[in-house]
Image: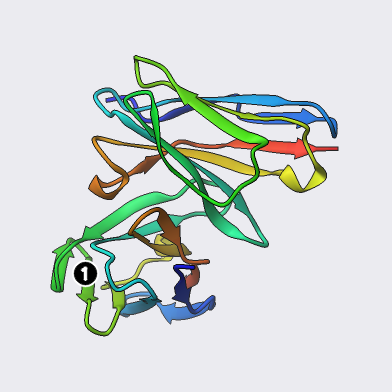
């Protein structure tokens, strides 16, 4: 059974700080990794995809992938209250597998 | 560019009935995958369709089935509904395969009473 582990949180950070969200996965052959943001009562929204080891930056978001350690993270710089949501990491090997999500709270 | 459209948004059904949910993908996307989301189990993969063929299937009973039409629209059917089927059902569309980035619809909230 392929699994994704995320700390459920909540992770609380002050406005303007860097939020760091982490995810570990069990499938060594996974090639595709994704971060989704889900607001309460809404559907998941794709934030980032990452396929290669290293960092990928998109605006205030940076995804980091380390396949050897089976670890993927998401950094949110200059966190805003509007970033408060649940962040889901996911990977695709045979089937898509999602973590249970980390709740992020950005307080003013 | 229109997003992924799911209908209906809300449904209330009685135990033992069946239900059909619909998903229209983003124009040009050929892959549609379906998910069940519950507070207890999180987001779980049901199945993926590509070019009218089921490509992958998650660990759900045979009561859950789906199909895809030539225009890439997809339907999901659940027969003999159980109380535990109450959930948010989401579909996601992607250009070729789920790992080329998938975009979710707003979901159908199914309540079984």
Towards the viewer: B2 or A80? B2
> Residue B112's x, y, as percent?
80, 37
The vertical placement of A104 against B55, above or below, is below
Which secondary structure lies at badge 1?
Answer: strand
Left or right of A22, for residue B1 = left
Let me know if residue A108 appears in the view.
no
* Chain letter, disc 1 residue: A
Q: Most extreme residue toward the bottom, as rendered?
A: A69
> Residue A6's x, y, as percent?
46, 75
Residue drawn 40% across the image and 53% down it:
A95
> Residue B77's x, y, as percent?
62, 28
> Residue B74's x, y, as percent?
46, 24
Q: Mark 1, residues whose alpha carbon is within 10 Å: few (<14), some, or many (≥20)? A: some
Left or right of A57, for residue B25 = right
Residue drawn 32% across the image and 45% down it:
B98
Let me know if residue B93 appears in the view.
yes
- Residue indicated by mark 1: A62
């Amino acid at each position: 059974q392929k699994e994704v582990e995320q700390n459920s949180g909540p992770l609380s950070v002050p406005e303007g700080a860097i939020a760091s969200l982490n995810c570990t996965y069990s499938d060594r052959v996974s090639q595709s990794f994704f971060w989704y943001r889900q607001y309460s009562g809404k559907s998941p929204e794709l934030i980032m995809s990452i396929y290669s080891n290293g960092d990928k930056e998109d605006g205030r978001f940076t995804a980091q992938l380390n396949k050897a350690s089976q670890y993927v993270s998401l950094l949110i710089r200059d966190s805003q209250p509007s970033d408060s949501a649940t962040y889901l990491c996911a990977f695709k090997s045979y089937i898509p597998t999602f973590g249970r999500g980390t709740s992020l709270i950005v307080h003013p | 560019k229109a997003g992924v459209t799911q209908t209906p948004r809300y449904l209330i059904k009685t135990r033992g009935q069946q239900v059909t949910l619909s998903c229209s993908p983003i124009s040009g996307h050929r892959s549609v995958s379906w998910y069940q989301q519950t507070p207890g189990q999180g987001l779980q993969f049901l199945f993926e369709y590509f070019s009218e063929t089921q490509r992958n299937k998650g660990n759900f009973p045979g009561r859950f089935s789906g199909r895809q039409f030539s225009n890439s629209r997809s339907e999901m059917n659940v027969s003999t509904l159980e109380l535990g089927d109450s959930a948010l059902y989401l579909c996601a569309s992607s250009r070729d395969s789920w790992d080329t980035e998938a975009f979710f619809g707003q979901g159908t909230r199914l309540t079984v009473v």
